[in-house]
Image (tube, coloured by chain):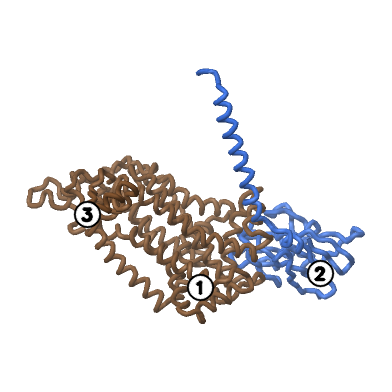
Amino acid sequence: MSGPSTYEPKTGIEKWLDSRLPIVRFSQDTMINFPTPKNLNYWYTFGGILSLILVVQIVTGIVLAMHYVAHVDYAFESVQRIRRDVPWGWMIQYIHANGASMFFLAVYLHMFRGLYYGSYKAPREILWILGVVIFLLMMATAFMGYVLPWGQMSYWGAVVITNLFGALPIIGETITTWLWGGFSVDNPTLNRFFSLHYLLPFAIAGVVALHVWALHVPGNNNPTGVSVKSGKDTVPFHPYYTVKDGFALLLFFILFAVFVFYMPDILGHADNYIPADPLVTPSHIVPEWYFLPFYAILRAIPDKLMGVLAMFASIGVLFILPWLDTSRVRSMRYRPVMRWFFLIFVGACLLLGYCGGQNPEGWVLHASRLATVYYFAYFLLILPIVGLIETPKPRPASIADSIHGDRGKPRSDTAATPAPAE
Amino acid sequence: MSEPSRRDFIYIAAGAAAAAGGALTLWPFIDQMNPAADTLALASTEVDLSQVTEGQQITVMWRGKPVFVRHRTPAEIEEARSVDVSGLRDPATDQERLVPLSGGEYQPQFLIMVGICTHLGCVPLGNRSGDYDGWFCPCHGSHYDTAGRIRKGPAPKNLEVPGYEYLSDTVVKIG
């Protein structure tokens, strides 16, 4: 909720500053006094977690760039040197590599949260679209970062992904040559990927600022999906959500640390410990786990161009999602039919992720085709149609009401009582 | 609507000049990503065919890409010629996949192709692999026959035949 500012400068210096650069007022209004729905559950903590992971990735990345050499003859060696010889290099490199996985884990949970509670619906369409832009930038950044160690998976991943653009009719070859800066993935490609991999995180930070701005205009959505009606529905962001986000952050970073210190390579691929060789293709090229669902969609379709288009469309459809959902009810907590379709959707995404890691043969191919059809049907058919025919459950009159407003009173419908303590 | 004034003209002219200038300035920053002069200068390579014995395939690098040079056996050539071309995904006769000597006659035993799958750019496995005794791409399962034509799998086109010419009976220049 951006409302009138409640900040009152008390000291002389604060008053002096407030009439020149009201930065203290801005911080107070956005991070301290910001009125936040009092019923946010732990699914709402991933935004804060994601901001900190972005900082971690930028800090570790700047350090790695001090030691990394972006040249086909030295890139692989220089990453090995960071791991073996540079003081603390092993730790910083593993934080950065696993940080990418943690980033996607958190962002997927954040996105599913938004899908379930209808956080993409009016008046938060731009907030959602900016989130999809961040997601796209993250994918580009992660892809180019994975190329930099110049192992076999780095190289062949770059070959396969840049060749996707070659599927476009007429201009395809011109585009791939332009992307490569040559006639194959080679030194010019590695150099530009390094340059862009360094740049894009700052672009992400910029879009994150817009994302937070767009969040602070309508304020947070919440598990009931009911808009904030009065001050009784909210608590100040600090200390209530700084502490809740902080606790969730701690738990998440314990998981992060388990990966970094106990199984740093488990999410990677052994073939990336072999230096890149343009003459030998690994027998089984797979992207990192967080791209597997999209890879499965690509391979589910037997035609090259259609496969590529379907893969891009699977993200493109997210941009128009706010206008595909016809229901007036935001939260699926009150949508008895839609919530089942949502659960199947989560299952379809996980199935696509599994299929993306397997050879596309036999039942795996059929499963990935089925899941691909469901993925698109969810957005293009189920959301528009179910929204029109479904009878939603009664919603609470307000957030405060949903928590304690009618406690002890007899109720005409028990269905609207949400789970307590969320 | 009032008559357009001199000020309207200035607005439009200034806006158009800024837009055109912006577009012109952008172009060098886009075009710099295209292959540089030294990359283009490395664009041809020569191969001595006398070193390739019958049934053998060598791989040479050309523009950073593998090029397959295969000395085919008579059986492989016969297999490639016996195919009904009209039923192929990317129709081409065996002879259309070759380049003649300067005199005009063909050396059908030497098949020269870019060793990159036309699907997503992997290097196919050779030595009579796949369902059609030619090449097989392990990435997404494309099968090519003994003339390098796509027969099965997701690849849309035959293995690319690079531009090359015979400098003599045994030496070709690729590129």
- Label 2: which residue? B47
Quadrant for residue B36, please give it: bottom right
Q: Chain of mark 3?
A: A
Evaluate whether residue A222 shows in this view: no
Q: Earlier in the sequence, mark 1 or mark 3?
A: 3
- Label 3: which residue? A39
| Palette colour of chain A | brown
Q: Is residue A322 above or below residue A64?
A: above
Location of residue A263 in the rendering, given as x and y in whole percent from the top left corner: 42, 77
Query: Mark 1 is on which residue type?
Result: His
Q: Nearer the viewer, residue B10 or A183?
A: B10
Dot 3 crowding, Cα within 10 Å, few <14, some 14–19, many 20+ = many
In this rendering, the label closer to the viewer, 1 or 3: 3
Which chain is in blue here? B
Classify residue A324 as left or right of residue A287: left
Dot 2 crowding, Cα within 10 Å, few <14, some 14–19, many 20+ = some
What residue occupies the far bottom of the structure in this picture?
Answer: A85
Mark 2, secondary structure of its residue: strand
Mark 1, secondary structure of its residue: loop
In this rendering, the label closer to the viewer, 2 or 3: 3
- Label 1: which residue? A269
Query: Mark 3 is on which residue type?
Result: Asn
Dot 1 crowding, Cα within 10 Å, few <14, some 14–19, many 20+ = some
Evaluate whether residue A137 shows in this view: yes
The residue depicted at 26 percent of the width and 51 percent of the height is A34
State the separation of the CA atoms marked 1 and 3.
Answer: 41 Å
Location of residue A21 in the rendering, given as x and y in whole percent from the top left corner: 34, 49
Residue A394: image tag: none
State the separation of the CA atoms marked 1 and 2.
Answer: 37 Å
State the separation of the CA atoms marked 2 and 3.
Answer: 73 Å
Q: Are marks 1 and 2 in contact (CB under 8 Å)?
A: no
Mark 3, secondary structure of its residue: loop
